[in-house]
Amino acid sequence: MDQWTDDLRVAPDYPGRLARLRDLLEPGEAFVSLDGPTNLYLTGLAASASAITVTRDAAELLVDFRYIEQAQQSVKGEWRITQTGDPLTRTVSRAAKAQGAGVLSVEPDRLTLKQWHSLLEGADGMRCQTRENLVAGLRQTKDSGEIAAIRKAIHIAEAAVQEAMAEVRIGMTESELAARIEYGFKSRGGRRPSFDTIVLFGARSSLPHGAPGDTRLEPGMVILVDCGCVADHYCSDLTRTWFFGTLIPPWFREIYEVTRQAQAAAIAAVRGGAECKAVDAAARDLIRDAGYGAHFGHGTGHSLGLEIHENPRLNLQDTSRLEPGMVVTVEPGIYLSGQGGVRIEDVVLVTDTGAEALTSLPKDLQVIEP
């Protein structure tokens, strides 16, 4: 870990997050969650199994034996920490009842159908209801600690990619390059990849989410890398495309430039108050007008944070509006089956007047000589 990334640590505002959630709750209402990212956001505990219940006057975190010591060490503030050996769905219902709740609220997309039915069975007279975007809505706008963690994850990922790309050679496989990038994450303090690293050579670069395999690098091939890491629980996301060789085919030069211009247009459209689908249209219209509309089939971007894909989304369907403090990717691409593809991706912070780029790797066409 270098001093630069050490300097990026900012204490998360867990008390503030809890207070903002409580402002959304009605008297007698308990918010219940068994979702790992939600519980991490509110308490600071990263656990594979946990439950929380929050009312206007109480907050309780429930864990099993595996996490009790970790919770006692890391969770601060007014949280009551309880160890349980019973199923969490049963225990959290009892805890909400003990807090005096008459209504039990959950976010419907953050629990399984089995968990929902188990909560209903244990409600003991409480009314159960779903509330969309209760905590997920709070998570859309990042505080200073979250932005610092994302910057740190980006710094680690960019350094790892630069180091790995300096070592590419003829005969290297996609999987080998992916492994070198992920080693770079770990060696710099990254906790893990934020998603399965994508490394694709040659014609396989036309697969938007292809998995690295045993394809070996040869002169004349496209190299597409899409990767990110987790630092202080927050994700980064980065895509760059290179050409390995000196004789760049005209088709690749053309789609690279169209993609670069499309990304610049979308970034220019990002600002507080901008409609998400309008940002998507800024990139999509340019790619369509260049004759490649059929070769760009995914959204232009998405928010990220504790999870690699969060809301809002920069796509054709999302009519919500960006707000200052949101952090989104901008990643248009063009994919020509049997030839290759290009994607360029950056992470930007939404401001009142525009977008602040958090990623910094060059975006002009990069040629790597064999």
Image (cartoon, rainbow, N blue to C red):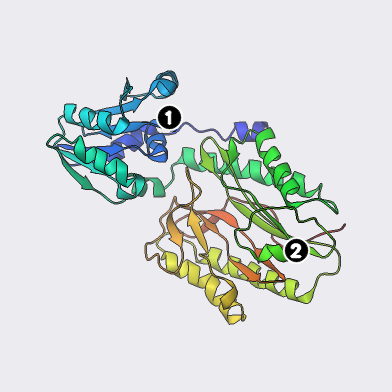
> At 67% from the left edge and 41% from the top edge, which residue is drawn?
182
Dot 2 surroundings within 10 Å: few (below 14), some, or many (20 or more)?
many
Residue 151 or residue 174, whichever sits in front: 174
Q: Which mark identifies residue 200?
A: none
Residue 15 lies, in percent from the top left, at: 34, 31
Mark nearest the camera among 2 and 1 is: 2
Q: CA distance from mark 2 to mark 1?
A: 42 Å
Return the residue at label 1. 45
Question: Circles 2 and 1: CB distance less than 8 Å?
Answer: no
> At 50% from the left edge and 65% from the top edge, which residue is drawn?
299
Residue 203 lies, in percent from the top left, at: 72, 66
From what the image shows, is residue 335 above or below residue 291? Answer: above
Q: Which mark identifies residue 202?
A: 2
Q: Earlier in the sequence, mark 2 or mark 1?
A: 1
Residue 91 or residue 369, whichever sits in front: 91
Quadrant including the N terminus = top right
Q: Is residue 38 left or right of residue 258?
A: left
Q: Is residue 22 visible in the rendered structure shown here?
A: no
Residue 146 lies, in percent from the top left, at: 48, 40
Residue 294 lies, in percent from the top left, at: 57, 77
In which quadrant of the rendered view does residue 20 lie? top left
> At 53% from the left edge and 66% from the top edge, which residue is drawn?
298
Residue type at mark 2 is: Gly
In which quadrant of the rendered view does residue 208 lie? bottom right
Secondary structure, mark 2, is helix
> At 68% from the left edge and 57% from the top edge, which residue is drawn?
240
